[in-house]
Amino acid sequence: MAQSQDNASPQSTIMQMLSAQIISRCIGLAANLAIADHLADGPKDVESLATAGDSNPDALYRVLRLLAGFGIFTELPDRRFQNNPLSEPLQTNAAGSLRHFARWFSDPMRWSALGNLDYSVRTGNSGLLKGQENRKVFDIMQEYPGSADTFSRAMTSVSMGDSHAIVQTYDFQPYNRIVDVGGGHGFLAILIAKAAPESQITIYDQPFVIDGATSAVRDAGLQDRITVQGGSYLEAVPGPADLIVMKNIVHGEPDNNALKLLRNCRQALDDGGRLLVIEAVVTDGPKGNGARIMDIEMLYGPGGRQRTEEEHATLFNATGFTLKGITPVPTGTSIVEAEAS
């Protein structure tokens, strides 16, 4: 008789954790093949899904059968499948869509870097940069435009849910000149502009990213209030500003680069200006597990780290800031607020 989950042996529990790698890869494959999109109008047999995705029907069936066993998609008689609450977020146009995030988790660039985690643990360096430590992650990303596009789409889709919660949690109206450093395709900046109608906002990011932001700002009709500027935040940050926002940026940098970035922010801020570092904060207990997982993602990927409250405060104190407080956001991230002192 199979053991219940509550009475699972340590060996069984470890085996389930190890097999999560295969489950994650299968979710990413289904996302790449847009299976949830193909099922949006109702159930389909695996032969139809395989034809749409140029796949082998039997192999695809085995993947979808596994996912259905874990509650992702529902298997019907005659090798037919339909969407369910767990597969619906994998639809491209679903509210809070995770399709592109799942695609990024299966991207060959990320998968290869994860395989270098042992190198990262031995050296403390990025597995993505193994053998080319003198280069920057963004330089490598430009050599893999498909991966870079998947990454940008993933960050944008995940940012959507976070960004709505952020503008509902924090009052942006007191600030006139706001800079969104690493603002990507501008989703957060556009929401801030709507929440703070008197503000002028600059989106600042790598040159190869800003075309998407320019289009988004134009589509939102906010060209008169939002400007888009390309550059490297490790060289400079646009100013003067009275608020700088960085969402999921500082955690991608090791401490030496994080210090450079924060010093550049301090130079761009007026005295008394505010800095918002928006990312998961490492805390004690089970609630901190998400941040600890992301910390490993930062270790083998860009070489950064998720930080505790004390580690944020140390960086701030060394760069002309004072930690003012940390405000949790319902989506699991936090707003770490500092004042230019």
Image (cartoon, helix red, strand yellow):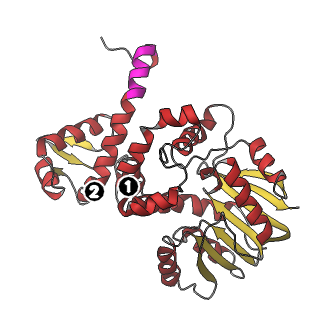
Proximity of marks 2 and 1: CB atoms separated by less than 8 Å: yes
Q: Label 2 crowding class (10 Å Cα cut-off): few <14, some 14-19, many 20+?
A: many
Q: Label 1 crowding class (10 Å Cα cut-off): few <14, some 14-19, many 20+?
A: many
Q: Is residue 8 visible?
A: no
Disc marking residue 99: 1
Comparing 263 with 77, the one in front is 263
| Percent position of residue 201, x then y | 66, 78
Disc marking residue 34: 2
Name which residue type carries label 2.
Ala
Q: Quadrant location of the N terminus?
A: top left
Q: Is residue 208 above or below residue 102?
A: below
Outermost residue on the bottom side: it is 224
| Percent position of residue 260, x then y | 72, 58
Disc marking residue 53: none
Q: Residue at x 37, y 46 (%)?
A: 86
Comparing 139 with 263, the one in front is 139
| Percent position of residue 54, x then y | 15, 55
Q: Is residue 206 above or below residue 108?
A: below
Q: Is residue 206 above or below residue 287?
A: below
Name which residue type carries label 1.
Arg
Q: Quadrant location of the C terminus?
A: bottom right
Outermost residue on the top side: it is 1
**Disc 1 element:** helix
Q: Is residue 38 magenta?
A: no
Q: Residue at x 52, y 43 (%)?
A: 297
- Main secondary structure of the magenta stretch: helix
Start and end of the magenta stretch?
Answer: 7-18
Q: CA distance from mark 2 to mark 1?
A: 8 Å
Relative side of 101 to 261, left or right? left
